[in-house]
Amino acid sequence: MTVRIIGAPTDYGANRRGVDMGPSAIRYAGLAEELADAGIDSRDHGDLAVPRAEELDSDRDAPETGSAKFLRETADVCSRLADEVSEALAVGDVPLVLGGDHSIGIGSLGGSARNADIGAIWFDAHADLNTPETTLSGNVHGMPLSAALGYGAFADMPWATAPRFRAENLVLVGLRSVDPAERELIEERDIAAYTMSEIDDRGISAVVEEAIATASAGVDGIHVSLDLDWLDPTEAPGVGTPVRGGATYREAHAAMEHVAASGALRSMEMVEINPTLDQHNGTAELATELAASAFGKTVL
Protein backbone atom coordinates (compact mmCIF):
# COMPACT_ATOMS: atom_id res chain seq x y z
CA MET A 1 0.00 0.00 0.00
CA THR A 2 1.17 3.50 -0.81
CA VAL A 3 -0.60 6.41 0.84
CA ARG A 4 -0.74 9.59 -1.20
CA ILE A 5 -0.90 12.65 1.04
CA ILE A 6 -2.83 15.55 -0.45
CA GLY A 7 -3.17 18.87 1.36
CA ALA A 8 -6.30 21.00 0.95
CA PRO A 9 -5.62 24.08 3.10
CA THR A 10 -9.03 25.76 2.96
CA ASP A 11 -10.98 27.76 5.47
CA TYR A 12 -13.70 28.96 3.11
CA GLY A 13 -16.24 26.68 4.76
CA ALA A 14 -15.62 27.70 8.36
CA ASN A 15 -16.41 30.76 10.43
CA ARG A 16 -13.09 30.80 12.32
CA ARG A 17 -9.77 31.38 10.61
CA GLY A 18 -6.89 28.98 11.15
CA VAL A 19 -7.97 25.58 9.79
CA ASP A 20 -6.11 26.36 6.58
CA MET A 21 -2.94 25.71 8.58
CA GLY A 22 -4.12 22.19 9.45
CA PRO A 23 -2.18 20.33 6.72
CA SER A 24 1.10 21.95 7.76
CA ALA A 25 0.45 21.19 11.42
CA ILE A 26 -0.23 17.52 10.69
CA ARG A 27 2.92 17.17 8.61
CA TYR A 28 4.99 18.96 11.26
CA ALA A 29 3.59 16.57 13.87
CA GLY A 30 5.22 13.66 12.04
CA LEU A 31 2.61 12.11 9.78
CA ALA A 32 5.13 10.47 7.44
CA GLU A 33 7.04 8.98 10.36
CA GLU A 34 3.87 7.58 11.97
CA LEU A 35 2.87 5.94 8.70
CA ALA A 36 6.37 4.53 8.26
CA ASP A 37 6.13 3.00 11.73
CA ALA A 38 3.02 1.20 10.50
CA GLY A 39 4.99 -0.17 7.56
CA ILE A 40 3.16 2.12 5.16
CA ASP A 41 4.94 3.90 2.32
CA SER A 42 3.71 7.42 1.75
CA ARG A 43 4.22 10.06 -0.90
CA ASP A 44 3.44 13.66 -0.13
CA HIS A 45 2.02 15.49 -3.14
CA GLY A 46 1.95 18.82 -1.36
CA ASP A 47 -0.96 21.21 -1.08
CA LEU A 48 -3.50 22.39 -3.60
CA ALA A 49 -3.12 26.06 -4.43
CA VAL A 50 -5.82 27.80 -2.41
CA PRO A 51 -6.16 31.60 -2.42
CA ARG A 52 -6.59 33.09 1.03
CA ALA A 53 -10.11 34.09 1.97
CA GLU A 54 -9.06 37.65 2.79
CA GLU A 55 -7.80 38.04 -0.78
CA LEU A 56 -11.26 37.31 -2.17
CA ASP A 57 -14.43 39.31 -2.53
CA SER A 58 -17.08 37.38 -0.61
CA ASP A 59 -19.77 39.15 -2.65
CA ARG A 60 -18.75 37.05 -5.66
CA ASP A 61 -21.23 34.39 -4.62
CA ALA A 62 -24.08 34.30 -7.11
CA PRO A 63 -27.65 34.79 -5.81
CA GLU A 64 -28.57 31.16 -6.47
CA THR A 65 -26.02 30.00 -3.89
CA GLY A 66 -28.37 31.18 -1.16
CA SER A 67 -26.53 31.72 2.09
CA ALA A 68 -23.64 29.39 1.30
CA LYS A 69 -20.48 31.43 1.73
CA PHE A 70 -17.58 31.21 -0.73
CA LEU A 71 -19.38 28.57 -2.76
CA ARG A 72 -17.62 29.40 -6.01
CA GLU A 73 -14.23 29.15 -4.35
CA THR A 74 -15.23 25.91 -2.67
CA ALA A 75 -16.36 24.53 -6.01
CA ASP A 76 -12.99 25.33 -7.55
CA VAL A 77 -10.96 23.72 -4.76
CA CYS A 78 -13.18 20.65 -4.48
CA SER A 79 -13.20 20.06 -8.23
CA ARG A 80 -9.41 20.05 -8.28
CA LEU A 81 -9.26 17.90 -5.17
CA ALA A 82 -11.63 15.36 -6.74
CA ASP A 83 -9.25 15.10 -9.70
CA GLU A 84 -6.29 14.51 -7.37
CA VAL A 85 -8.12 11.83 -5.38
CA SER A 86 -9.34 10.08 -8.52
CA GLU A 87 -5.87 10.12 -10.08
CA ALA A 88 -4.33 8.65 -6.91
CA LEU A 89 -6.79 5.78 -6.91
CA ALA A 90 -6.26 5.17 -10.63
CA VAL A 91 -2.59 4.33 -10.04
CA GLY A 92 -3.27 2.23 -6.96
CA ASP A 93 -2.48 4.76 -4.23
CA VAL A 94 -4.75 5.34 -1.23
CA PRO A 95 -5.47 9.07 -0.91
CA LEU A 96 -5.17 10.69 2.51
CA VAL A 97 -6.49 14.24 2.32
CA LEU A 98 -5.44 16.76 4.96
CA GLY A 99 -7.79 19.66 5.63
CA GLY A 100 -8.65 22.38 5.92
CA ASP A 101 -12.28 22.70 6.84
CA HIS A 102 -14.81 19.93 6.20
CA SER A 103 -16.10 21.43 2.96
CA ILE A 104 -13.22 19.56 1.31
CA GLY A 105 -15.21 16.39 1.91
CA ILE A 106 -17.14 17.31 -1.23
CA GLY A 107 -13.98 16.86 -3.27
CA SER A 108 -12.78 13.78 -1.42
CA LEU A 109 -16.09 11.98 -1.87
CA GLY A 110 -16.45 13.11 -5.48
CA GLY A 111 -13.02 11.83 -6.43
CA SER A 112 -13.35 8.55 -4.56
CA ALA A 113 -16.77 7.86 -6.11
CA ARG A 114 -15.84 8.84 -9.66
CA ASN A 115 -15.06 5.32 -10.86
CA ALA A 116 -16.34 3.11 -8.04
CA ASP A 117 -19.32 2.57 -5.78
CA ILE A 118 -18.39 3.76 -2.31
CA GLY A 119 -19.75 4.01 1.19
CA ALA A 120 -18.65 6.50 3.83
CA ILE A 121 -18.21 6.58 7.57
CA TRP A 122 -18.39 10.12 8.94
CA PHE A 123 -16.72 10.40 12.36
CA ASP A 124 -17.98 13.80 13.46
CA ALA A 125 -19.80 15.64 16.22
CA HIS A 126 -21.98 17.19 13.49
CA ALA A 127 -24.17 15.71 10.78
CA ASP A 128 -22.92 17.98 7.96
CA LEU A 129 -26.27 17.58 6.17
CA ASN A 130 -27.34 21.19 5.85
CA THR A 131 -28.05 22.76 2.48
CA PRO A 132 -27.91 26.38 1.31
CA GLU A 133 -31.65 26.51 2.09
CA THR A 134 -31.44 25.11 5.64
CA THR A 135 -28.08 26.33 6.93
CA LEU A 136 -28.12 28.52 10.02
CA SER A 137 -24.60 29.87 9.42
CA GLY A 138 -23.93 29.78 5.68
CA ASN A 139 -20.76 27.79 6.35
CA VAL A 140 -20.21 25.07 3.77
CA HIS A 141 -18.30 22.87 6.24
CA GLY A 142 -21.77 21.98 7.52
CA MET A 143 -22.97 20.88 4.07
CA PRO A 144 -20.54 18.38 2.44
CA LEU A 145 -22.76 15.32 2.77
CA SER A 146 -25.82 17.06 1.35
CA ALA A 147 -23.62 18.30 -1.49
CA ALA A 148 -22.23 14.86 -2.27
CA LEU A 149 -25.70 13.31 -2.15
CA GLY A 150 -27.24 16.08 -4.28
CA TYR A 151 -29.73 17.39 -1.74
CA GLY A 152 -31.41 20.79 -1.96
CA ALA A 153 -29.75 23.34 -4.20
CA PHE A 154 -26.80 20.98 -4.68
CA ALA A 155 -28.96 18.88 -7.01
CA ASP A 156 -28.23 21.51 -9.67
CA MET A 157 -24.48 21.63 -9.01
CA PRO A 158 -22.76 18.76 -10.87
CA TRP A 159 -19.36 19.60 -9.36
CA ALA A 160 -20.70 18.81 -5.88
CA THR A 161 -22.37 15.44 -6.30
CA ALA A 162 -20.49 12.17 -5.82
CA PRO A 163 -21.75 10.04 -8.73
CA ARG A 164 -21.59 6.57 -7.12
CA PHE A 165 -22.27 7.33 -3.47
CA ARG A 166 -25.70 6.69 -1.92
CA ALA A 167 -27.29 7.53 1.40
CA GLU A 168 -27.85 3.85 2.16
CA ASN A 169 -24.07 3.45 2.47
CA LEU A 170 -23.53 6.52 4.64
CA VAL A 171 -22.99 6.14 8.39
CA LEU A 172 -22.67 9.00 10.87
CA VAL A 173 -20.75 8.10 14.03
CA GLY A 174 -20.50 10.13 17.22
CA LEU A 175 -23.20 12.76 16.70
CA ARG A 176 -23.92 15.24 19.47
CA SER A 177 -24.78 18.49 17.66
CA VAL A 178 -27.48 18.17 14.99
CA ASP A 179 -29.65 20.95 13.54
CA PRO A 180 -33.44 20.40 13.25
CA ALA A 181 -33.37 20.25 9.45
CA GLU A 182 -30.55 17.71 9.56
CA ARG A 183 -32.50 15.56 12.02
CA GLU A 184 -35.48 15.55 9.66
CA LEU A 185 -33.27 14.58 6.72
CA ILE A 186 -31.65 11.72 8.64
CA GLU A 187 -35.10 10.35 9.44
CA GLU A 188 -36.54 10.99 5.98
CA ARG A 189 -33.63 9.34 4.12
CA ASP A 190 -33.16 6.61 6.75
CA ILE A 191 -29.48 7.46 7.16
CA ALA A 192 -27.61 5.27 9.65
CA ALA A 193 -26.59 7.50 12.56
CA TYR A 194 -25.06 6.80 15.96
CA THR A 195 -24.91 9.37 18.73
CA MET A 196 -22.31 9.39 21.48
CA SER A 197 -25.02 8.12 23.80
CA GLU A 198 -25.30 4.98 21.71
CA ILE A 199 -21.53 4.55 21.82
CA ASP A 200 -21.75 4.86 25.61
CA ASP A 201 -24.44 2.19 25.74
CA ARG A 202 -23.08 -0.30 23.22
CA GLY A 203 -19.36 0.40 23.10
CA ILE A 204 -17.23 1.76 20.29
CA SER A 205 -16.34 -1.64 18.81
CA ALA A 206 -19.94 -2.75 18.31
CA VAL A 207 -20.93 0.58 16.77
CA VAL A 208 -17.98 0.80 14.38
CA GLU A 209 -18.28 -2.83 13.27
CA GLU A 210 -21.94 -2.18 12.44
CA ALA A 211 -21.02 1.06 10.68
CA ILE A 212 -18.43 -0.73 8.54
CA ALA A 213 -20.95 -3.40 7.59
CA THR A 214 -23.48 -0.78 6.50
CA ALA A 215 -21.03 1.45 4.66
CA SER A 216 -19.35 -1.43 2.81
CA ALA A 217 -22.48 -3.33 1.78
CA GLY A 218 -22.45 -3.84 -2.00
CA VAL A 219 -19.74 -1.26 -2.72
CA ASP A 220 -16.10 -1.28 -3.81
CA GLY A 221 -14.70 0.42 -0.70
CA ILE A 222 -15.34 3.03 1.95
CA HIS A 223 -14.27 6.60 2.47
CA VAL A 224 -13.47 7.54 6.07
CA SER A 225 -13.89 11.14 7.10
CA LEU A 226 -12.34 12.01 10.46
CA ASP A 227 -13.27 15.40 11.84
CA LEU A 228 -11.10 15.92 14.90
CA ASP A 229 -14.05 17.50 16.70
CA TRP A 230 -15.41 13.94 16.90
CA LEU A 231 -13.11 13.60 19.88
CA ASP A 232 -13.78 15.29 23.18
CA PRO A 233 -12.19 18.77 23.41
CA THR A 234 -10.06 17.55 26.33
CA GLU A 235 -8.41 15.18 23.85
CA ALA A 236 -8.43 17.45 20.80
CA PRO A 237 -8.65 21.13 21.79
CA GLY A 238 -7.38 22.48 18.48
CA VAL A 239 -10.63 22.41 16.50
CA GLY A 240 -12.90 25.19 15.32
CA THR A 241 -16.24 23.83 16.55
CA PRO A 242 -15.63 21.83 19.74
CA VAL A 243 -18.54 20.00 21.37
CA ARG A 244 -18.22 18.47 24.83
CA GLY A 245 -18.86 14.78 25.34
CA GLY A 246 -16.91 13.35 22.42
CA ALA A 247 -14.87 10.22 21.85
CA THR A 248 -11.93 9.42 24.07
CA TYR A 249 -8.38 8.85 22.90
CA ARG A 250 -8.74 5.09 23.24
CA GLU A 251 -12.17 4.99 21.57
CA ALA A 252 -10.78 6.90 18.59
CA HIS A 253 -7.85 4.53 18.19
CA ALA A 254 -10.11 1.49 18.53
CA ALA A 255 -12.39 2.88 15.81
CA MET A 256 -9.48 3.40 13.41
CA GLU A 257 -8.12 -0.07 14.21
CA HIS A 258 -11.47 -1.58 13.21
CA VAL A 259 -11.35 0.42 9.97
CA ALA A 260 -7.90 -0.99 9.21
CA ALA A 261 -8.94 -4.55 10.05
CA SER A 262 -11.91 -4.34 7.68
CA GLY A 263 -9.67 -4.04 4.63
CA ALA A 264 -12.33 -1.82 3.06
CA LEU A 265 -10.61 1.56 3.35
CA ARG A 266 -10.48 3.25 -0.06
CA SER A 267 -9.81 6.88 0.84
CA MET A 268 -9.57 9.04 3.95
CA GLU A 269 -9.51 12.63 5.09
CA MET A 270 -8.67 14.40 8.36
CA VAL A 271 -10.15 17.84 8.84
CA GLU A 272 -10.87 20.85 11.04
CA ILE A 273 -7.57 21.04 12.93
CA ASN A 274 -6.98 24.65 13.93
CA PRO A 275 -3.42 25.17 15.22
CA THR A 276 -4.28 28.66 16.52
CA LEU A 277 -6.58 27.02 19.07
CA ASP A 278 -4.36 24.02 19.85
CA GLN A 279 -2.01 23.28 22.73
CA HIS A 280 1.56 22.41 21.69
CA ASN A 281 0.26 20.97 18.38
CA GLY A 282 -1.27 18.10 20.34
CA THR A 283 -4.37 17.78 18.16
CA ALA A 284 -2.26 17.45 15.03
CA GLU A 285 -0.07 14.86 16.76
CA LEU A 286 -3.19 12.90 17.66
CA ALA A 287 -4.32 13.08 14.03
CA THR A 288 -1.07 11.47 12.88
CA GLU A 289 -1.51 8.63 15.38
CA LEU A 290 -5.09 8.01 14.29
CA ALA A 291 -4.10 7.99 10.63
CA ALA A 292 -1.48 5.35 11.36
CA SER A 293 -4.05 3.25 13.20
CA ALA A 294 -6.46 3.52 10.26
CA PHE A 295 -3.75 2.22 7.92
CA GLY A 296 -2.80 -0.70 10.11
CA LYS A 297 -0.50 0.33 12.95
CA THR A 298 -1.01 -1.79 16.07
CA VAL A 299 0.78 -2.24 19.39
CA LEU A 300 1.77 -5.84 18.53
Image (cartoon, rainbow, N blue to C red):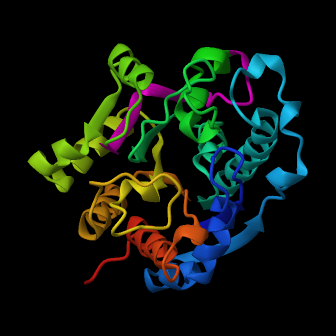
Q: Is residue 1 visible?
A: no
Q: Is residue 174 magenta?
A: yes
Question: In percent of the image, x 36 and y 39: which residue is there?
Answer: 177
Q: Where 280 falls versus 131 (above or below)?
A: below
Q: Is residue 155 magenta?
A: no
Q: Position of residue 37 (x, y in %)?
A: 45, 85
Q: Quadrant of residue 171?
A: top left
Q: Position of residue 121 (x, y in %)?
A: 40, 44
Q: Is residue 248 visible?
A: yes
Left or right side of 10 for 189: left
Q: Where 183 falls versus 193 (above or below)?
A: above
Q: Position of residue 263 (x, y in %)?
A: 38, 56
Q: Quadrant of residue 116?
A: top right
Left or right side of 134 for 255: left
Question: In percent of the image, x 57 and y 33: which residue is there?
Answer: 143
Left or right side of 94 for 207: left
Left or right side of 257 for 270: right
33 or 252: nearer the viewer: 252
Q: How many marks?
A: 0
117 or 101: nearer the viewer: 101
81 or 118: nearer the viewer: 81
In magenta, the rendered stretch is: 156-175
Image quarter where the C terminus lies is bottom left
Question: In percent of the image, x 61 and y 31: which residue is there?
Answer: 162
Q: Position of residue 145 (x, y in %)?
A: 53, 33
Residue found at the very far left of the displayed protein: 201
Question: In percent of the image, x 43 and y 80: which residue is there?
Answer: 38
Q: Where 9 falls versus 120 (above or below)?
A: below
